[in-house]
Image: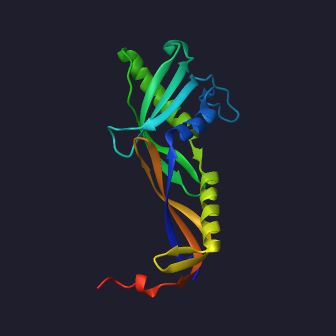
Amino acid sequence: MEDAIKIYLPVTISYPALEGVLKSQLVGEYFPKSEEGAEAAPYVQVQDLGISGSRAAANEVIVRIKLRILRTVMKRDQVELFVLAALGYDNETQQLYVQQFKLDSRTSSGFYNTALEVMVNKVAYGQILKMARVDLAAIIAEQLVKANTTLQDGLEIKGIKLLGEVKSVRVLNVVPFPDKVALSVELHGNMEANVLNLAELLPEK
């Protein structure tokens, strides 16, 4: 039977680690990006970006985006958006991404708020947040190497020694916490189990 054994492995990632990747991808970029074959003047430039856990909303994160507004009708030096976002994970690309979001910040101007919401829906969701994807392939590969190194020598658990190789990795769940993001990772592999101590496997009398 292929991939008969499943091992569940918790993996955590700190917000500073996620923030560093997002900044390298987005800070300094202009949006919206021109479509192929069409020229379009950008609305905004990303000045800064941060991510942190939300203590008010379970399973969501706060994405802070500082933008420089470029269009004349809305022109300001800077505006800071606070976006409440749910995270998802794409197992095919091994990327963590913003699954859905809602704007959670306002300015003192009603007119500007309306224009800002239109701009966010068109620009932030359409392009900025869609680009805010973190490639976890290297992290997943590292966990795979660790698991296979351990299994090559034999992993002893309650009187059983497991030997074999992990073939594939799948993330089952993404749960944001106030200080980190936790991933529930499932490892699939072919293994054999050698019973070392049968007494440890029997139920207590």
Instruction: Give the image location of residue 128, x and y in percent.
Output: 55, 34
Residue at x-position 65% and y-position 31%: 34
Residue 172 horizontal side relative to residue 169, left or right: left
The quarter of the displayed image where residue 142 is located: bottom right
Q: How many marks?
A: 0
Whether 75 is drawn above or below 197: the answer is above
Q: Percent from the top left, x then y, of residue 85?
A: 43, 40
Image quarter where the N terminus lies is bottom right
**Of 133 and 205, the residue lying toward us:** 205
The way the protein has been coloured in the rendering is rainbow
Where is residue 160? Give x, y as percent: 50, 80
Outermost residue, right side: 37
Q: Is residue 76 above or below residue 158?
A: above
> Where residue 75 sits: x, y (%)?
52, 13
Farthest left residue? Answer: 205
| Viewer-nearest residue: 122 or 37 | 122
Q: Quadrant of the C terminus?
A: bottom left
Quadrant assignment, res 118: top left
User: What residue is rendered at 54% in x and 12% in y?
Assistant: 72
Q: Against 185, is 200 above or below?
A: below
Between residues 96 and 182, which one lies in front from this camera angle? 182
Say which residue appears at 60% left-offset and 38% top-offset. 21
